[in-house]
Image: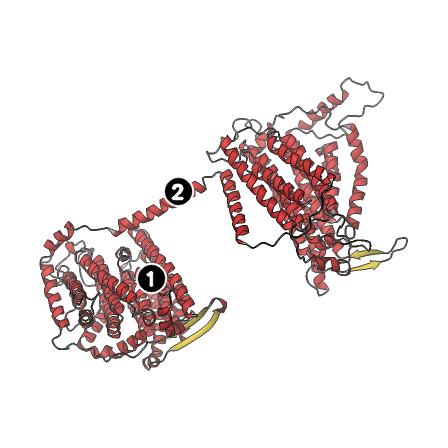
């Protein structure tokens, strides 16, 4: 069982790192999401694995698994959602501003908006 | 306490000139002078004790655990140097008042000067070597400001930079040396270190410490081969040159060598390094000085030469040589400062300080000429001037010290240096003040106002007085040399006449040779021009440029602006650090019994790994990627359930839904495909990094899981019910034991949501808005955007979902659930309305201000914590009790409930704020707001049913909305 969890974490990490190094923003975001999965599972697993021992106090329980990593991972899941949301919106805004979703602009700034939005530029009163 | 005041006064006083310059230049100079005078008077009140041989100490603890304390001590050496610094400082302040022009910011000048003065006094009075190092660096910094005072002159800026680079580098070397020294002696207090001389010299660390400390001293005191910065620092105003290069900054290195003399001197290494460096510096400096046409350049190189002389004397390591060195420090300070001031007067009044354009000034400015001549004769070492006395002693010591078994090399070289010294001193007098009068001076030369010639005149009086009655200086030299040597002194008498000695003969040779050199100056100048002349500034610039080019190369290689490259470096570095840490640690054996793996988990594992592989291979199809991500999240939730983490499973699955919806909304505007761009090589590199990262992380967690451990969780499990009032330990940890963590996390979540709002709100203006307005969907839209079944189902489910949310929230303290999960569930319930009925329809009915919701959530959580204060307990301490209401069972209420409501509100607010703002973008582009309960307009029965009713209704709304 440990081997399954460990290899799962490893495979998710590897896929996450690979996607992290891609040239467009969307795969990078997916890569970060995968890394979040991997890290959360990693942290959870530091409390060791146990089945049928949920950390809910009751008289009939045979014992409890370690609750502390679970509490930490619970907030980590929510925070990684917040992080994913921010970077996805960041990527979206960057794409809307620059017209490109490339990660690198090392070769120089791409031409900005071009002529596409010139006509409708003033009609910004919607919503 | 007096000692501290002596050091602090200049620092405190440094604030005054900048303020008082508004009251005029006189008031400014007067204040500055008073500050220095006060410090000097305080110092002189200590004189009786110092001359009685006492060591005055003052001590305050500052950072005792670092060994850094504010400790001062005053003995003969410290008194002597502090007196020089403050006394000459006072003269310089008077001189500068008349030297600086109206355009120069005088307030700045005096402020820098006082800062520098304070730092110098700090060096000579510090007892703690770490404190001394602080002051040492302060002198480097404040001298940088002083040398570069004329900011408009490129030479001034370059000179200041060079001085800072060289002395700063020396300062670093000094820090290392001092730390070693402190470690050997077991204390950073000088008074203690000075007691441990034998121990330090026997230590194997003696030589490294010596070299490092000398590195600091030699750079500061401009010893060969670090002498080049000093002449370039001459770009400073003359008062600065006079102050820094006669009595203070360059003497700091000498001071330190004298201070450390009992500890470091006396060994072979000391003799050969220090004496040889001093000798070489003395000869080379004097030779260059002879041919400098710039008067200040001449004096600068002469200063280098004289510093070499003192260094050599200290290097000899004998008490007699130390006495001679101390005496020469005093004499050099008096005549050199006077000479710098006269050079400044000549520059000021004649308009140039180029010896080739001067001459015959004696008749035009007789007072200046007299002062300069007397001081220069002292520098030359003529009898009846104080320079003669110490030079005599130097020659005597050199004549009696063999170098590597050779008895004549030291006296020969020393005499050669003296010959040059006589020659340049004479040149300063005869080529400037004597000779034919010229008619092409840039300005009409005349004597300066009294304020400018009185300070050098005072010094020259000292020069002559000590020269005629050397016994006057005897007590001072005795007490200072005693402090340097740190032991009994041999019998000595400062006198003009010691009989016909070898030193006297050498002196005569020097005077004769010097006169001859000057007579044949042009011939020797040709000889010099024929010799190779390494230009230190070019070499220094080349070195600096080389270093800068190397840094640029390194930076360009690492930071070329490509984020992908940074990430690759980051991953590689993380891997390297992890592997190194793992390899260098010790590891326990994996004794924990492994769990069996039944068939179902293996199936789940296959799905997960398959999903990962699929995502790598199909990541260019972005929609497919999102589907796979959903699969992975689901498997993880199931895994959490299986591995006894029901709370995590609930959180994971609800977060998963929200995340995928968010990504889908964003993907609406992004390209749906990722182009194939990376080269094979790049993919191979990334793949390799990825595989190693995976192996590292997977391997690590496997090793962790196969080892047993101890946890602090026992406490949480035991205290959950009695202490926290809940049976769901995870929830109790979240809202109680580690409530402060959770409080921080909901704040982060709220900030993230606000950041998203800011980012998206900004997209409604500027280029992004133009792009949105002209948006053309890149995919065909569904004709039936809001399917009837879905609309009805979600609306029916909304109250149910809300009830489920409340249920999950309420049971959270005792069963899996809680604020986080309930918040996510409720968010999803709302989200479904957005998806099914359209953003516009839902938004009109959701009259909730999400910003306020986040704020209330955080505030409520905070207030719950603060409530504990009212009960006199720490922040976020919880309380609970059981209550009975009619018709209901006994139930529990805990204060953490308020906290959990805060969590709930923040989560709902954050999620909804993020999604609602994404939807605003969508509405901007295409979504018409439908006023009807659903897009399909329910057609009344009496009306004729058009074949494409739904579509036309849609179009109608659309046009209505747009107009």
Give the Cα separation between the discs numbered 2 and 1.
32 Å
Q: Is residue B206 above or below residue B637?
A: below
Foreground mark, 2 or 1?
1
Between B579 and B939, which is closer to the camera in this rendering? B579
How many labels sit on residues? 2
Tell me if mark 1 has few (under 14), some (14-19) or many (20+) residues whose alpha carbon lies within 10 angstroms of its own: some
Residue for badge 1: B211
Residue for badge 2: B553
Between B172 and B182, which is closer to the camera in this rendering? B182
A97 displayed left or right of B822 = left
> Hey, which quadrant is residue B248 in on the image?
bottom left
Tell me if mark 2 has few (under 14), some (14-19) or many (20+) residues whose alpha carbon lies within 10 angstroms of its own: few
Q: Is residue B363 above or below residue B610?
A: below
Residue B452: x and y in percent read 24, 65
Numbered disc 1: secondary structure: helix
The residue at 56%/39% (across/down) is: B690
Q: Quadrant of the C terminus of chain B?
A: top right
B271 displayed left or right of B529 = right
Residue B605: x and y in percent read 68, 39
Q: What chain does badge 2 belong to?
A: B
Between B785 and B78, which is closer to the camera in this rendering? B78
User: Is mark 2 in CB contact (under 8 Å) with mark 1?
Assistant: no
Numbered disc 2: secondary structure: helix
Residue B742 bears which disc, if any? none
The residue at 80%/53% (across/down) is: A61
């Amino acid at each position: 069982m440990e081997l399954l969890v460990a290899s799962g974490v490893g495979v998710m990490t590897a896929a996450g790192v690979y996607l992290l190094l891609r040239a467009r923003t969307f795969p990078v975001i997916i890569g970060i999401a995968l890394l979040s999965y991997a890290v959360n599972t990693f942290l959870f697993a530091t409390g060791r694995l146990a089945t049928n021992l949920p950390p809910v106090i009751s008289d009939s329980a045979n014992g409890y698994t370690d609750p502390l990593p679970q509490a930490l991972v619970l907030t980590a899941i929510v925070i990684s959602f917040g992080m994913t949301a921010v970077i996805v919106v960041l990527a979206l805004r960057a794409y809307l501003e620059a017209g490109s979703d490339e990660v690198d602009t090392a070769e120089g700034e791409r031409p900005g908006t071009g002529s596409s939005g010139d006509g409708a530029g003033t009609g910004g009163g919607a919503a | 306490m007096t000692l501290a005041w002596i050091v602090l006064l200049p620092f405190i006083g440094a604030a005054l000139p900048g303020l008082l310059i508004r009251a005029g230049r006189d008031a400014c100079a007067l204040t500055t002078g008073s500050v220095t005078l006060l410090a000097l008077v305080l110092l002189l009140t200590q004189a009786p004790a110092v001359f009685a041989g006492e060591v005055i100490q003052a001590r305050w603890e500052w950072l005792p655990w670092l060994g850094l304390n504010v400790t001062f001590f005053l003995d003969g050496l410290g008194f002597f140097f502090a007196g020089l610094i403050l006394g000459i400082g006072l003269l310089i302040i008077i001189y500068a008042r008349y030297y600086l022009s109206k355009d120069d910011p005088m307030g700045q000048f005096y402020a820098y000067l006082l800062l520098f003065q304070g730092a110098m006094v700090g060096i000579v009075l510090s007892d703690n070597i770490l404190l001394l190092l602080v002051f040492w660096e302060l002198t480097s910094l404040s001298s940088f400001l002083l040398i570069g005072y004329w900011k408009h002159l490129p030479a001034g800026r370059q000179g200041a930079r060079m001085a800072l680079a060289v002395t700063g580098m020396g300062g670093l070397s000094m820090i290392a040396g001092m730390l070693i020294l402190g470690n050997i002696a077991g204390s950073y207090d000088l008074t203690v270190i000075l007691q441990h001389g034998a121990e330090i010299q026997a230590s194997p660390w003696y030589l490294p410490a010596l070299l490092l400390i000398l590195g600091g001293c030699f750079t500061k005191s401009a010893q060969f081969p670090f002498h080049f910065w000093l002449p370039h620092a001459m770009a400073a105003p003359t008062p600065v040159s006079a102050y820094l290069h006669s009595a203070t900054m360059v003497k700091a290195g000498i001071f330190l060598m004298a201070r450390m003399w009992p500890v470091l001197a006396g060994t072979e290494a000391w003799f050969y390094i220090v004496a040889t460096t001093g000798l070489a510096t003395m000869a080379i400096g004097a030779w260059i000085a002879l041919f400098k046409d710039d008067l200040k350049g001449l004096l600068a190189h002469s200063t280098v030469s004289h510093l070499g002389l003192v260094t050599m004397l200290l290097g000899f390591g004998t008490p007699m040589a130390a006495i001679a060195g101390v005496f020469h420090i005093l004499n050099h300070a008096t005549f050199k400062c006077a000479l710098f001031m006269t050079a400044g007067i000549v520059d000021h009044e004649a308009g140039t300080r180029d010896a080739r354009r001067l001459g015959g000034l004696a008749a035009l400015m007789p007072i200046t000429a007299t002062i300069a001549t007397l001081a220069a004769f002292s520098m030359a070492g003529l009898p009846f001037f104080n320079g003669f006395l110490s030079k005599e002693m130097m020659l005597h010591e050199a004549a009696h010290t063999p170098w590597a078994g050779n008895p004549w090399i030291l006296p020969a070289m020393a005499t050669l240096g003296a010959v040059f010294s006589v020659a340049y001193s004479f040149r300063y007098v005869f080529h400037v003040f004597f000779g034919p009068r010229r008619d092409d001076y840039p300005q009409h030369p005349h004597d300066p106002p009294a304020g400018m010639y009185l300070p050098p005149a005072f010094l020259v009086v000292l020069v002559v007085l000590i020269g005629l009655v050397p016994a006057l200086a005897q007590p001072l030299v005795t007490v200072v040399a005693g402090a340097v040597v740190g032991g009994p002194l041999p019998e000595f008498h400062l006198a003009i006449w010691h009989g016909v000695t070898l030193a006297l003969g050498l002196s005569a040779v020097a005077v004769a040779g010097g006169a001859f050199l000057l007579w044949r100056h042009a011939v020797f100048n040709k000889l010099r021009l024929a010799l190779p002349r390494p230009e230190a500034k070019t070499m220094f610039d080349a070195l600096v440029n080389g270093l800068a080019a190397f840094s640029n190369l390194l930076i360009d290689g690492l930071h070329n602006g490509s984020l992908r490259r940074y990430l690759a470096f980051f991953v590689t570095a993380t891997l390297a650090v992890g592997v190194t840490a793992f390899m260098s640690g010790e590891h326990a054996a994996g004794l924990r019994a492994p769990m069996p793996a039944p068939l179902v988990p293996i199936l789940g594992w296959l799905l997960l790994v398959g999903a990962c592989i699929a995502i790598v291979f199909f990541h260019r199809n972005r929609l497919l990627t999102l589907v796979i991500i959903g699969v992975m999240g689901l498997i993880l939730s199931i895994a959490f359930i299986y591995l006894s983490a029901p709370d995590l499973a609930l959180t994971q699955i609800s977060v998963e839904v929200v995340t995928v919806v968010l990504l889908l909304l964003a993907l609406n505007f992004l390209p749906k495909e990722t182009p194939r761009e990376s080269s094979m090589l790049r993919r191979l590199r990334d793949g390799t990094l990825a595989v190693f990262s995976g192996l590292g992380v997977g391997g690590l967690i496997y090793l962790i899981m196969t080892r047993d451990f101890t946890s602090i969780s026992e406490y949480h499990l035991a205290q959950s019910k009695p202490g926290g009032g809940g049976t769901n330990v995870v929830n109790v940890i979240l809202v109680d034991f580690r409530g402060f963590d959770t409080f921080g996390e909901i704040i982060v979540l709220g900030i993230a949501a606000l950041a998203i709002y800011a980012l998206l709100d900004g997209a409604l203006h500027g280029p992004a808005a133009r792009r949105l307005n002209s948006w053309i969907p890149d995919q065909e839209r569904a004709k039936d955007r809001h399917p009837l079944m879905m609309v009805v189902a979600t609306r029916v489910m909304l109250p149910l979902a809300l009830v489920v949310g409340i249920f999950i929230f309420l049971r959270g303290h005792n069963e899996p659930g809680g604020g986080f999960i309930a918040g996510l569930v409720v968010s999803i319930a709302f989200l479904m309305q957005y998806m099914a009925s359209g953003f516009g329809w839902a938004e009109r009915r959701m009259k909730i201000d999400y910003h306020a919701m986040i704020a209330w959530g955080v505030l409520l959580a905070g207030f719950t914590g603060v409530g504990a204060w009212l009960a006199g307990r720490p922040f976020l301490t919880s309380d609970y009790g059981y209550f009975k209401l009619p018709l209901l069972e006994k139930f529990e209420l805990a204060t953490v409930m308020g906290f959990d409501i805060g969590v709930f509100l923040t989560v709902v607010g954050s999620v909804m704020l993020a999604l609602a703002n994404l939807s605003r973008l969508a509405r901007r582009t295409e979504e018409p707001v439908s006023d009807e309960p659903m897009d399909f307009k329910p057609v009344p029965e009496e009306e004729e049913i058009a074949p494409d009713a739904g579509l036309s209704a849609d179009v109608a709304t659309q046009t209505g909305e747009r107009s």
